[in-house]
Image (cartoon, rainbow, N blue to C red):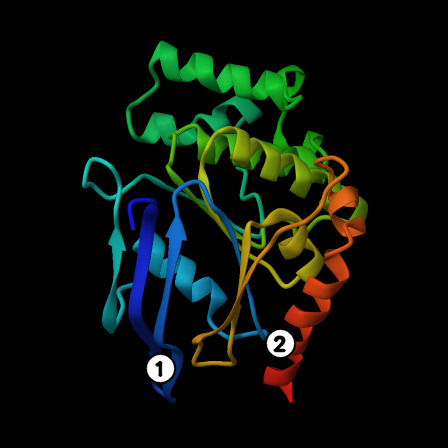
């Protein structure tokens, strides 16, 4: 219990329109450990993104609850990365990555210095005065991550942030961003349709049922790695077994 940061307890949620009700989650429960990299997979449309919106406070559960167990007893800071970078073209890279600091009136020298260091560490220092259209897809996602990290969130919610990238760039950027998150000691929850990505990046993979979602299976990931690369993860002797087992759980939901 001491290491739990987020606890979802019997969470239920439905979307309501003029045409009726769509139940997205039904008494869904799981916990997230502090410093854990958690991946959530499941059938398309099963409510994965709804979970992140509820954790972020963008939606309110109909029943059940979400408990944050941070050290100071307060709700931890939450950063949200979406499928697209949503960088503002009329602002430079620097003005994009400091947007949150500007809005929250936290443009201190200390915070700005920390952002400059991240730009340098992630290979974007030379592009800080460029516009987003002058960056590659991978560079845009790194900039989006810096914008998210600038506010020093304790939890990062990642809603398929690599899905818009081509396959080769996706492999490189996902590995880089996962490494950055781990090195910073952040807790991350990743939504993905890519099972290889989930197995390669996560400490644990949660499989959801078809809508309304419940937790169907949980897979702690333990890979024997030659190094910390995604290629090494996909060549690990345990990789194929994890992939097949998770795929069977999801395929069974589609049947």
Of residue 144 and residue 152, the one placed in the foreground of this image is 152
Count the numbered circles shown: 2
Label 1's element?
strand
Of residue 84 and residue 23, the one placed in the foreground of this image is 23
Q: Nearer the viewer, mark 1 or mark 2?
A: 2
Determine whether, in the image, residue 109 is placed left or right of residue 201: left
Numbered tag placed on residue 17 in the rendering = 1
Residue 196: give x, y in percent of width and height.
Answer: 71, 57
Position of the C terminus by quadrant: bottom right
Disc 2: CA contacts within 10 A as few (<14), some (14-19) or many (>=20): many
Q: Is residue 129 visible?
A: no
Of residue 143 and residue 210, the one placed in the foreground of this image is 210
Determine whether, in the image, residue 8 is placed left or right of residue 45: left
Question: Which residue occupies the extreme left position in the image?
Answer: 73
Numbered tag placed on residue 229 in the rendering = none
Q: Which quarter of the figure has residue 3?
A: top left
Residue 121: give x, y in percent of width and height.
Answer: 61, 19
Q: CA distance from mark 1 to mark 2?
A: 28 Å
Q: Which quarter of the figure has residue 251?
A: bottom right
Q: Kindly indicate whether the residue at mark 2 contacts the one at mark 1 (C-beta within 8 angstroms).
A: no
Numbered tag placed on residue 250 in the rendering = 2
Q: Which quarter of the figure has residue 249?
A: bottom right
Q: Residue at x 70, y 36 (%)?
A: 228
Residue 229: give x, y in percent of width and height.
Answer: 74, 38
Label 2's element?
helix
Q: Earlier in the sequence, mark 1 or mark 2?
A: 1
Residue 136: give x, y in percent of width and height.
Answer: 72, 35
């Amino acid at each position: 219990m001491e290491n739990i940061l987020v606890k979802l307890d019997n969470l239920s949620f439905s979307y309501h329109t003029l045409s009726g009700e769509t139940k997205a989650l039904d008494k869904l429960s799981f916990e997230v450990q502090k410093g854990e990299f958690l991946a959530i997979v499941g059938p398309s449309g099963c409510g994965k993104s709804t979970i992140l919106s509820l954790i972020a406070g963008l939606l309110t559960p109909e029943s059940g609850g979400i408990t944050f167990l941070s050290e100071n007893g307060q709700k931890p800071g939450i950063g949200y990365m979406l499928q697209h970078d949503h960088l503002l073209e009329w602002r430079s890279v620097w003005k994009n990555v400091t947007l949150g600091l500007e809005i929250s009136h936290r443009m201190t020298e200390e915070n700005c210095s920390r952002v400059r260091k991240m730009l340098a560490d992630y290979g974007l220092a030379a592009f800080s005065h460029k516009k987003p259209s002058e960056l590659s897809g991978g560079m845009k996602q790194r900039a989006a991550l810096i914008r998210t990290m600038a506010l020093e969130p304790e939890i990062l919610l990642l809603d398929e942030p690599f899905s818009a990238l081509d396959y080769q760039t996706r492999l490189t950027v996902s590995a880089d961003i996962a490494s950055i998150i781990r090195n910073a000691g952040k807790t991350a929850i990743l939504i993905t349709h890519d099972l290889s990505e989930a197995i390669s990046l996560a400490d644990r993979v949660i499989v959801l049922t078809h809508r309304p979602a419940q937790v169907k299976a949980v897979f702690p990931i333990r890979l024997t790695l030659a190094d910390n690369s995604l290629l090494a993860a996909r060549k690990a002797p345990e990789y194929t077994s994890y992939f097949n087992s998770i795929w069977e759980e999801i395929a069974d939901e589609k049947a």
